[in-house]
Image (cartoon, grey):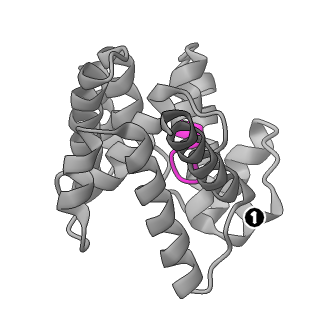
Amino acid sequence: MFYQKFIKKELSEKRYNHSINVAMAAEDLAIRYSVDKEKAKIAGILHDITKEWSKEKHFRFAKEYDIKFSDYELASKKLLHALTGSYYLKYILKIKDHEIINAVRFHSTARSDMSLLEKIIYISDFISEERRFEGVEELRELSRENLESTMICGLAYSLHELVSEKRIIHPNTFKAYNEAIFNKVKIQNIKI
């Protein structure tokens, strides 16, 4: 894959390996949930393309491409790379597929009304092979059975981690979590 060679030059070995693992997880989930596996592999391999940039480089890039960071993104360097990464795909790599661009854009915060590809990249980032947090094996298994339940667990994990570390929580994460819970409740009510 072209992008694999490209990111090898752009990322540290650790981040490169993570990106390869996310692409492989995304391909597996794409096949399982009938999503374009090539799109999933591309979004997976490129999702962290600007993750290792300095804050200053993010700001220079934002100025050049007229990117407007929200206060939430400015308060957390971790959130900058999702936005600059999506612009990097669009303007530097000339990727025209909005679904791939959005999958990169929302892989850190999630959002309401996510496409299946966006959910797959969000989850694949959680369950990639090198991840070792408590509960990751259960999350990997769940991802093969029910994507929506995996979203709820992944979002709950993120919210818990952010609260316990007293860090900023992007409103998109709350919206994604609430939407996932509302959808689960609707499905349960239909079955009654």
Which residue is located at x 22 percent, y 50 percent?
140
Which residue is located at x 56 percent, y 17 percent?
94
Name the image quarter holding residue 112.
Answer: top right
Between residue 66 and residue 114, name the one nearer to us.
114
The dominant secondary structure in magenta is loop
- Residue 23 sits inside the magenta stretch: no
Between residue 109 and residue 20, name the one nearer to us.
109
Name the image quarter holding residue 38.
Answer: top left
Name the image quarter holding residue 2.
Answer: top left
Q: What residue type is labelled 1?
A: Tyr
In the displayed structure image, the side of residue 170 where residue 129 appears, left or right = left
Q: How many labels does the image show?
A: 1
Q: In which quarter of the image is the N terminus?
A: top left
- Residue 107 sits inside the magenta stretch: yes
Residue 83 visible, this orientation: yes
Which residue is located at x 78 percent, y 42 percent?
67
Residue 192 at what x, y percent from top left? 50, 39
Residue 184 sits above or below residue 165 on the image: above
Residue 25 at what x, y percent from top left? 24, 38
Residue 25 sits above or below residue 27 on the image: below
Residue 146 at what x, y percent from top left? 33, 39
Residue 176 sits above or below residue 158 on the image: above
Residue 5 visible, this orientation: no
Residue 33 at what x, y percent from top left? 32, 23
Residue located beneath label 1 in the image: 72
Q: What is the magenta range? A: 104-110
Between residue 171 and residue 60, name the one nearer to us.
171
Between residue 112 and residue 169, name the one nearer to us.
112
Which type of secondary structure does the marked residue at label 1 adopt? helix
In the displayed structure image, the side of residue 59 where residue 160 appears, left or right = left
Crowd band around label 1 with a 10 angstrom C-alpha radius: few (<14), some (14–19), many (20+): some
